[in-house]
Image (tube, helix red, strand yellow):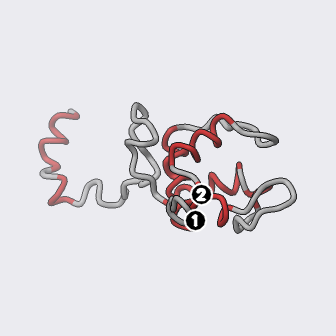
Amino acid sequence: MIWLWLACAGDPAETGIGDSVPADPCLVDEDANAFEIEGVPDCGEPVYAEHCASCHGVAGEGTSAGPSMTEMMPMHADEQVLFVIVAGTGDMPGFELEQGELAHLLAWLREGFGDYAPGR
């Protein structure tokens, strides 16, 4: 019976089947690492809000518990930023995040606080 219904349903492109479910840009290949994933800044904002904002400030302005992202991001390459997020440093704990969360968080940080600018 299922085969008969599928055969009669026709081409999904012509029937509109599947058109109502847009692809979620936050979903990524679970086997990829953060450097293979094209991070989506909008997907990184909630990761920052959950894990970083309490110390680095809601707008990344820094607090007594963590430095300003505006000052820190241009000073560090992507590899360094991700290492600190995962391993921690000084008083900052490391975070166990999925590779997609790391890629999206890095994209959000770069969009909001600048690219790596050595010598700055």
Q: Nearer the viewer, residue 99 or 85?
A: 85
Q: Mark 1 points at which residue?
A: 120
Q: Nearer the viewer, residue 59 or 62?
A: 62
User: Crowdedness of circle 1 by 10 Å Cα count: few (<14), some, many (20+)?
Assistant: few
Disc 1 secondary structure class: loop
In-image side of 38 versus 47 (left or right)? left
Q: Residue at x 40, y 45 (%)?
A: 37
Please give the count of numbered marks on the rendered protein. 2
Q: Nearer the viewer, residue 56 or 4?
A: 56
Q: Residue at x 59, y 66 (%)?
A: 113
Q: Residue furthest right?
A: 64
Task: Locate the C terminus and report the quarter of the image it occupies.
Answer: bottom right
Q: Distance between the residues labelled 1 and 2?
A: 7 Å
**Amino acid type at mark 1:** Arg
> Which disc number belongs to residue 30?
none
85 shown above or below 108: above
Q: Mark 2 points at which residue?
A: 75
Instruction: Kindly check if marks 1 and 2 are in contact, taking CB atoms under 8 A apart as contact.
Output: yes
The answer to which image quadrant residue 67 occupies is bottom right
The answer to which image quadrant residue 60 occupies is bottom right
Across and down, in percent, residue 45 comes to: 60, 59
Disc 2 secondary structure class: helix
Task: Locate the N terminus and report the quarter of the image it occupies.
Answer: top left
Across and down, in percent, residue 100 comes to: 49, 43
Across and down, in percent, residue 78 comes to: 51, 49
Q: Residue at x 65, y 58 (%)?
A: 72
State which tag comes first along the sequence, 1 or 2.
Answer: 2
User: Crowdedness of circle 2 by 10 Å Cα count: few (<14), some, many (20+)?
Assistant: some
